[in-house]
Image: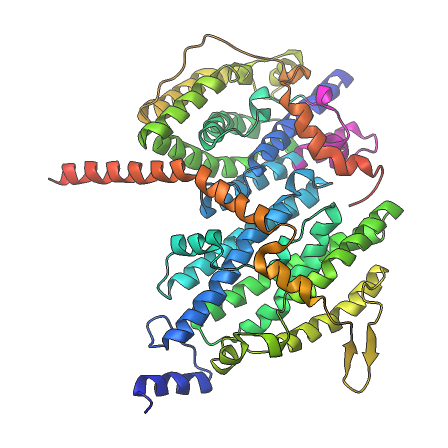
Amino acid sequence: MSDQMKNALLEYTTRLGDDAVVLGHRISEWVSYGPFLEEDIAYGNVALDYIGRARMFYTYAAELADDGRDEDDFAYMRNDREYHNLLLLELPKGDFAYSQVRQLFADVYYTLMLPQLLQSKDERLAAIAAKAIKETKYHLRRSRDWVLRLGEGTDESHRRAQKALDQLWGYTHELFDMDETEQLLADADIGVDVSKLRDDWLAMVTEIVTNATLSVPEDSWAVRGGRIGYHTENLGHMLTEMQIVHRSHPGCKW
Amino acid sequence: MTIPQEENFMRKISAEEKIEPKDWMPAAYRKNLIRQISQHAHSEIIGMQPEGNWITRAPSLRRKAVLLSKVQDEAGHGLYLYSACETLGISRSEMIEQLQTGAAKYSSIFNYPTLTWADVGAIGWLVDGAAIVNQVSLQRTSYGPYARGMIRICKEESFHQRQGYEAMLALAKGSEGQKAMAQDALDRFYWPALMMFGPHDSDSAHSQKSMEWKIKRETNDDLRQKFIDQTVQQIEVLGLEHPDKDIKWNEERGHYDSSDLNWDEFWSVINGNGHCNRQRIEHHVAAHEEGEWVRDAITAYNEKKRAKKAQHAA
């Protein structure tokens, strides 16, 4: 493998780890704050799945980097400008509708993306995808059911769900952007060409949102930058909290 | 004159047969059980807060996953215990209301703040450890659903305790800063952990009847002694200092002698004036109130679906 390809693979694997740890963190913020006990348990489950994913991606990234770093160095010792996650995933948890709509967007995305990653010529990425697919199937069932219930529930839940859709829509475009790194890997059948997922994503989301008697927002705005570390202001605060203990005791084992 | 039902009930109790939800039971037995099981359930639920406090700051991804999984287990135990309690004729929403109004209690240990990462380890090791000593004894409790619940819960709690101890070990064998953090957590959580067994037997309002009915199988002081004895060596292995300077092996008793507890503090926390009593309940109430529109949405959604179905059927 060329150095260029190797670097691209490291960057790609790290991005997928960043996506997982950031969303996992946001979901975990719901534990003990859910609307009822069963939801606390479900949130815990989903957060665990994402933290597990992050560990697999980072462990692989650490092997690729081969410079003595481990999964925790990737999670805890990089600053916000070095994190290359999708912006959608770092936004604060908001209210229950906001979190569930974000989750729906992510779940539909992974439902389409992971089967492609499963086909990757890179066995490690394919193996992670194989495990994640099963989890995402359950995640999607849950977020879809919730969006349906909120959309068709009360006036208030409908209003909140629609507001969440409107607030989050502009962050979804970035999910389908390709840059040189990702194109290089997609051309080599290692990475996923996410630009090809947009139509199916839109169709699936539209069906669910429409069934929920909600409206798909107009494509009137788009915010981008996660993949180059141009974040919202939220990520810095998240990482400050996440990394504080680890960084306060340099070089320690836990 | 004893009524035959009561005779039959007491015969079962003496014969170590389990009392099941549909069996006749004295009203006071039922009341006593509801108090104890719901208190136990509430403890699991409120216990999610002090540990949940560290999920976002856990110092490694592995520890974060372990902690998330533990807190999730606690929620599962709460759910399981609420269900066991519902077999006695009280609903979960009634129990939650009792928790929020202060009519029902939860373990006082969760009214102590978790100030450092080491507190998470100390809770797993000492608090779950103390809970297990109590719960192992409760596997033989006379009420069937509670006893069966305890068997399942004990398995998971033992796992938590090992993980907590292992987290403490990593700190105790780590840097000076980590070791100091571990010692500080031990010093703060040791005494409240001992208080988890409740007041001295002589001051325990519910103990006597509970023992007679075999709801409780061992006394507060006996269980506490077991915990004190088993913890001494665990502290030695960690290489930390024992918080009780008067701890001393008593050959004659075959147990460790120890200092008496600060019972003023115990009663003060029980009576709602600990460090976090207000915070814990406010947190629970706030989450519950913020979730109201979500619960309303489900109810409305389900009603709409039912109405639609009925329309189709007609």
Give yes or no for residue B196 being in the magenta stretch. no
Q: Residue A89's image quarter?
A: top right
Q: Residue A164's image quarter?
A: top left
Where residue B152 appears, x then y in whole percent?
53, 64
Residue placed farthest to the top in the image? A220
Q: Residue at x 37, y 61 (%)?
A: B90
For the N terminus of chain B, the quadrant is bottom left
In the figure, is residue B72 to the left or right of A124?
Answer: left
State the residue in front, A37 or A75. A37
Give yes or no for residue A76 being in the magenta stretch. yes
State the residue in front, B243 or B236. B243
- Magenta range is A55-83
Seen in the picture, residue B70 relative to A6 is either above or below; the reply is: below
In the rendered image, is residue A221 in sight? yes
Is the magenta region chiefly helix, strand or loop?
Answer: helix
Seen in the picture, residue B58 relative to A69 is either above or below; the reply is: below
Residue placed farthest to the bottom in the image? B1
For the C terminus of chain B, the quadrant is top left
Residue placed farthest to the right in the image? B176
In the rendered image, is residue B162 in sight? no
State the residue in front, A44 or A185. A44
Q: Residue at x 47, y 27 (%)?
A: A98
In the figure, is residue B71 to the left or right of B62?
Answer: left
Seen in the picture, residue A177 relative to B301 is either above or below; the reply is: above
Q: Residue at x 52, y 14 (%)?
A: A173
Where residue A27 appears, x then y in whole percent?
55, 35
In the figure, is residue B228 to the left or right of B73?
Answer: right
Where residue A118 appears, x then y in whole percent?
56, 30
